[in-house]
Image (spheres, grey):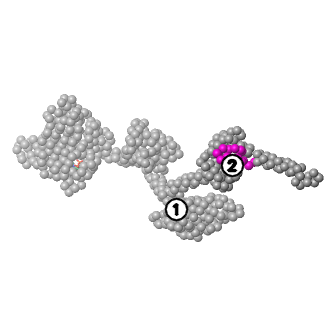
Amino acid sequence: MEPNQTPGSIATLEKENEELKDRVAQLTDFIEHGAVPLHWVNADGIIIWANQAELDLLGYDRHEYLGKSITDFHQDPTIIHELFKRLLDHETLSDYPATLICKDGSLKYVVISSNGLFKDGEFIHSRCFTKDITALVREEERRNHLMQLLKKSEERLRLAIEATALGTWDWVLEEGKIYLSTETKKILDLEDDILYPDHILALVHPDDRGEVSLKIEGLQHHISDRSFDFICRTKKSKLNNTCWIKVQGLIHFDPDQGLHRIIGSILDITDLKVAETTNAELVAIVNCSNDAIIAKSLDGTITSWNHAAEEVFGYSAAEMIGHSTEKLVPENLKDQENDLLQRLRTGESLKHFETKRRTKSGKLLDVSLTISPIRDERGNIFGISKIARDITDKKLEERRKNDFISMVSHELKTPLTSVLLFTQVLKQKFNESSDDVGLQITAKIENQTKKMTSLIRDFLSLARIEEGKLQVVIEPISLLTLFEEIKNEAELLINKHHIKFACDSNITILADRDKMGQVLMNLLSNAIKYSPDGGTITLGCEKFGEKIRLYVQDEGIGIDLADQKKLFNRFYRVDSEQTNHIAGFGIGLYIVSEILLYHHSTIEVESEKGVGTTFYFFLDVTPESQR
Ligand code: ADP
């Protein structure tokens, strides 16, 4: 110590004063330029001082911050009131959360630690330390956002899994437990959420247990992550109710823990298996069928071609699939084929439609086609299935039969005409000599001969219709004259019947004289045959616009509704006690309907059992007859 610096001396005091000033200056500098943001707010809420760190934190210049109200810088100014209240209560606040507004408009998340400076019990100003926690808050927000995304994607996955009816399971090896989802329990018919590994095999169908056991055994020897899958039947399976499941999983291998978890899914694939089996059965049926079975898309492209199609048409599946059936259709039938396709597109089906097709070697085949549209589960037509049967041999046989009938009928027709002629001459002779017995016998011969002639005429027509050789010559015919001719011809068949005409005498129809006579004769002879108790038979007509409606009405036995639909089929006869003893071949009405088709008309029937029957059809008439 120097002599003039004794304790309490002026020199000493001055020195101490200097040192004190130095320390205050250092402290002020430390606070002014320290890293911790700090500001003071007076009792009026005005910022009276702030250090550089505080200004840097918020980005303001000194003059933009100092002298301003602290509430201008808080996102939630209402907290200032609360802060002041507590400071005035001499409370020291620690880490009070607040959000401050920076100069560039961004926000800073901070925590404020503060206490008040009082002089003589009066509040002078607050001392607030501001700690920036923006990075922490942002990190927290990011984490929350991620958690939300995770939750959403988990929810999406859950919904997706629910939508697929997929069950899930989680096998935690160290716990020795397999955790099951609700869907898995449903598929396996289990109630507990947990399945123990030892119980797995008991759930498997006995026939599949060996294989599944090997699979499970194998899983436990893996030393890396690996996926696996297998299919088996469950124990629920009964002979007629097999339940199939597909199990998929991923083995999680940890180098430290080893194999520790297997997570996977389970799906009930019974429907798929049944569909597979049905499909296999159908493929087998299609492949062993003797009929050509072909599937086509709506534009006519072949999508399937079975073995029989290869044999019938000579083209292999490889040659036909992906191509059109056009080359099978003979040139003159192209329009018919297009027409068929058009009808099928609108949902129509065709059964046993007879037509011709050409084979690879150029041979023409007679085929019978059954065609139907193929629909998807919504009922929309997306293809066409065709079953083609080769009926060339059958057609050949039919042609031979028709030729034979035609030939025999022709051979019988000439001698019968002579017999009828001679009988009529004889009848005339007996009439002149008043030989009643002779007259009766010749009348009977004439009757029977006429029946035979009419039968032969029907057989000849049948053969011609079958060959498509029936020809009609349309000419004007007086309807009343035709009715009278028919009535005369049928005279000998009649016993208790009364035939009447209900027809305008001036009507002239446009028809083939011979064929229309045959139509009316067939209908009239049926009316007589099937009215054993007699009654009135009406040959009538009514005007119907430009056409006339022609009918033959009787008061006979009538026809059941079920039979009415089949009457016009070839060889169809009603099988009943009332009709069994009445002779016939079942071709009369077939010929009527076919002849009428050549007149662009169709035969219709109205009938009631025990009341009578009316057959009717429409015909063209001359313009004069239309008035
Ligand atoms: P057929 O008379 O030779 O048996 P059709 O083709 O003329 O053959 O007639 C077919 C069937 O229709 C007959 O077997 C008969 O049962 C029924 N049928 C036809 N016409 C009548 C009618 N007028 N009344 C009642 N049944 C009839």
Q: Residue at x 41, y 38 (%)?
A: 338
- Name of the residue lying farthest toward the right: 3
Task: Name the residue at the left extreme.
Answer: 434
For label 2, the SS is strand
Of the residues under marks 1 and 2, which one precedes in the sequence?
Answer: 2
Name the residue tied to disc 2: 124
Please give left or right for residue 595 compared with residue 152 in the image. Answer: left
Alpha-carbon neighbours of circle 1 within 10 Å: few (<14), some, or many (≥20)? some
CA gap between label 1 and label 2 equals 68 Å
Q: Which residues are magenta?
A: 35-50
Of the two numbered discs 1 and 2 in the rendering, the one whose residue sits closer to the viewer: 2
Query: Residue 182 has which mark?
Result: 1
Residue nearest the observer in this picture, 627 or 579: 627
Residue 119: x %, y % from top left: 70, 51
Residue at 12%, 46% in the rendered image: 536
Location of residue 73 in the rendering, given as x and y in whole percent from the top left corner: 64, 44
Question: Is residue 457 at least partly visible in the picture?
Answer: yes
Amino acid type, label 2: Ile
Instruction: Report whether the residue tagged 2 is closer than 8 Å to ligand 1.
Output: no
Residue 220 versus residue 297 in the image, above or below: below
Q: Bin the neighbour count of mark 2 within 10 Å (Cα to Cα): few under 14, some 14-19, many 20 and up.
A: some
Amino acid type, label 1: Thr
Residue situated in front as seen by the camera: 568 or 196? 196
Quarter in which the N terminus is drawn: bottom right
In the rendered image, residue 442 lying in the magenta stretch gets the answer no
In the rendering, at what x and y percent does residue 457 appear?
A: 23, 43
Residue 113 vs residue 601: left or right?
right
Query: Is 43 included in the stretch rendered in magenta?
Result: yes
What is the x, y in percent for residue 369? Answer: 39, 46
